[in-house]
Image (tube, rainbow, N blue to C red):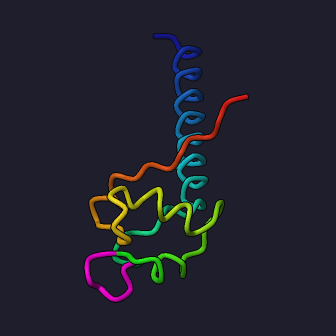
């Protein structure tokens, strides 16, 4: 391998590493969804509407989102329902 090829490989490596670091920093700035225990304020193993309504939501109203997550419609979000919930995806135009 000649010197020019080694230089190209080294520059490529540096660019790739820099891109990965930037991507990691970008993802760190985005807040992730809260964990179940932080919403289950009273620690009873379920999230009721009172607990859920204390959360800040980026989009939508509390009742609609709560109803969507509470798949068995018993008025309480279980840890399983919370874990299995997937927010709706944005529609492509």
Query: Would you say residue 42 sits in the magenta stretch?
Result: yes
Query: Would you say residue 37 sits in the magenta stretch?
Result: no
Q: Viewer-proximal residue, 1 or 8? A: 8
Where residue 84 appears, x then y in whole percent? Answer: 33, 52
Q: Residue furthest top?
A: 1
Which residue is rendered at x = 57% and y = 27% of the image?
12
Question: Height in image: 87 above or below 28?
Answer: above
Span highlighted in magenta in the image: 40-46
Question: Height in image: 11 above or below 8?
Answer: below
> In the visual, does 50 lie left or right of 83?
right
Which of the 4 image quadrants contains residue 4? top right
Where residue 36 appears, x then y in whole percent? Answer: 36, 70
Where residue 65 appears, x then y in whole percent? Answer: 53, 61
Which residue is rendered at x = 26% and y = 83% of the image?
44
Q: Viewer-proximal residue, 59 or 15? A: 59
Which of the 4 image quadrants contains residue 34? bottom left
Q: Viewer-proximal residue, 37 or 68? A: 68
Question: Height in image: 61 above or below 91?
Answer: below
| Magenta segment, prevailing SS (helix, strand or loop) | loop
Which residue is rendered at x = 26% and y = 77% of the image?
45
> In the visual, does 57 lie left or right of 36?
right
Q: Which image quadrant: the C terminus? A: top right
Q: Which image quadrant: the N terminus? A: top left
Where residue 61 appears, x then y in whole percent? Answer: 63, 66
Which of the 4 image quadrants contains residue 63? bottom right
């Amino acid at each position: 391998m000649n010197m020019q090829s080694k230089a190209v490989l080294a520059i490529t490596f540096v660019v790739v590493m820099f891109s990965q670091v930037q991507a990691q920093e970008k993802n760190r700035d985005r807040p992730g969804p809260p964990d179940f225990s932080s919403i289950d304020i009273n620690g009873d193993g379920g999230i009721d509407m009172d607990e859920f309504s204390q959360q800040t939501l980026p989009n939508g109203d509390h009742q609609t989102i709560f109803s969507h997550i509470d798949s068995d419609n018993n008025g309480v979000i279980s840890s399983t329902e919370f874990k299995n919930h997937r927010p709706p995806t944005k529609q492509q135009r």
